[in-house]
């Protein structure tokens, strides 16, 4: 297989990897936002209100969850909110860190991450909420965790970068093979003809026949006498 053909195949494969990566990236984002996002996996508490939820050790997301009349154009605005997470006896107080996320809206149901709580130990926690939520429909604080699809999203990003680098390298390789082909054609503008098209070299017998035809035509035209014709004929047949 020629290097030019290999370069073309390599370029096509790199472009295919880029196309698949873009499609996978978009699919992973959609799944992350609408399918795999478990923002309310551990339950919800109304705002204002209180309740008890079983929370696992580790990071727990705290999101504002409400119903909207129409999808917010610039994201769901987060009003002043307050939350207290009381741990079981003997467990350290959870550490609450503000972490405003992007708004996700599905069928007029909207939520946006507000905090991430670091839970010291698995257990049942008493949660009290308050806030300025006038104008919000059925506002709640939802407790859950981030989607595991984030790693897949970055995997497709890395794959796209690999495909892009491969396409650039393959494009340069293909350009070099094209320049070499042009240079070779310029150096040999008259390529050797194939054996079937090569000029036919006449044999000695063929040369004699042609000369005999010539002197016969001269005799017939009167340019040679019969004696001169016979003498020339003998000389040709004797190979002189």
Image: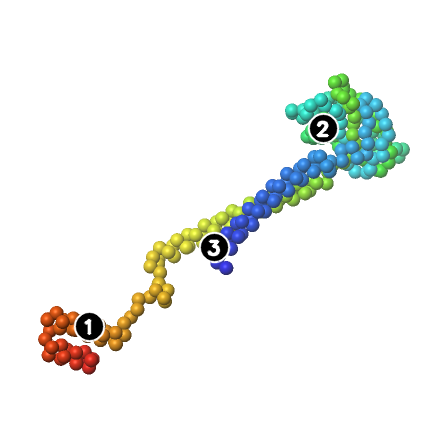
Q: Which of marks 1 and 3 is nearer the N terminus?
A: 3
Label 1, on which residue?
A: 213
**The C terminus sits in image quarter:** bottom left
Secondary structure beneath label 1:
helix
Q: Nearer the viewer, mark 2 or mark 3?
A: 2
Q: How far apart are marks 1 and 3 (CA)?
A: 55 Å
* Residue 59 or residue 227, whichever sits in front: 227
Q: Where is residue 76 in the image (x, y as percent from the top left)?
A: 69, 25
Circle 3 residue? 4
Identify whether 25 is placed above or below 85: below
Q: Nearer the viewer, residue 137 or 221?
A: 221
Label 1 neighbour load within 10 Å: few <14, some 14-19, many 20+? few
Which quarter of the picture shows residue 62?
Answer: top right
What residue is rendered at 37% in x and 56% in y? 185
The answer to whether mark 1 and mark 2 are in CB contact below 8 A is no
Query: Measured along the vertical axis of the image, is residue 76 above or below residue 14?
Result: above
- Residue of label 2: 107
Label 3, secondary structure: give it: helix
Residue at position x 33%, y 59% in the image? 190
The residue at the far front in this view is: 220
N-term mark: 1 or 2: 2
Circle 2 SS class: loop
- Give the camera-side residue of 160 and 202: 202
Q: Is residue 180 something that shows in the picture?
A: yes
Q: In this view, does 20 lie to the left or right of 80?
A: left
Neighbour class for label 2 at 10 Å: few (<14), some, many (≥20)? few
Q: Nearer the viewer, mark 1 or mark 2?
A: 1
């Amino acid at each position: 297989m020629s290097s030019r053909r290999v370069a073309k195949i390599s370029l096509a494969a790199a472009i295919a990897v880029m196309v698949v990566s873009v499609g996978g990236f978009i699919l992973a984002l959609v799944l992350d936002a609408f399918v795999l996002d478990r923002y309310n996996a551990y339950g919800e508490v109304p705002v204002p209100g209180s309740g008890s939820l079983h929370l696992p050790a580790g990071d727990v997301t705290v999101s504002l969850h409400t119903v909207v009349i129409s999808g917010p154009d610039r994201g769901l605005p987060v009003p002043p909110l307050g939350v207290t997470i009381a741990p079981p006896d003997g467990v350290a107080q959870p550490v609450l860190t503000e972490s405003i996320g992007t708004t996700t809206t599905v069928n007029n149901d909207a939520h946006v991450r507000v905090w991430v709580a670091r839970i010291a130990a698995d257990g049942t926690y008493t949660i009290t909420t308050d806030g300025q939520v006038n104008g919000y429909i059925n506002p709640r604080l939802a407790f859950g965790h981030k989607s595991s699809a984030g790693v897949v999203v970055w995997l497709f990003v890395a794959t796209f970068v690999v495909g892009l680098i491969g396409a650039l390298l393959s494009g340069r390789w293909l350009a070099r093979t094209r320049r070499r082909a042009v240079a070779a054609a310029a150096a040999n503008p008259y390529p050797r003809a194939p054996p079937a098209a090569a000029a036919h070299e006449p044999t000695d017998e063929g040369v004699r026949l042609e000369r005999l035809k010539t002197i016969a035509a001269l005799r017939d035209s009167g340019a040679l006498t019969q004696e001169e014709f016979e003498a020339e004929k003998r000389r040709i047949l004797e190979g002189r």
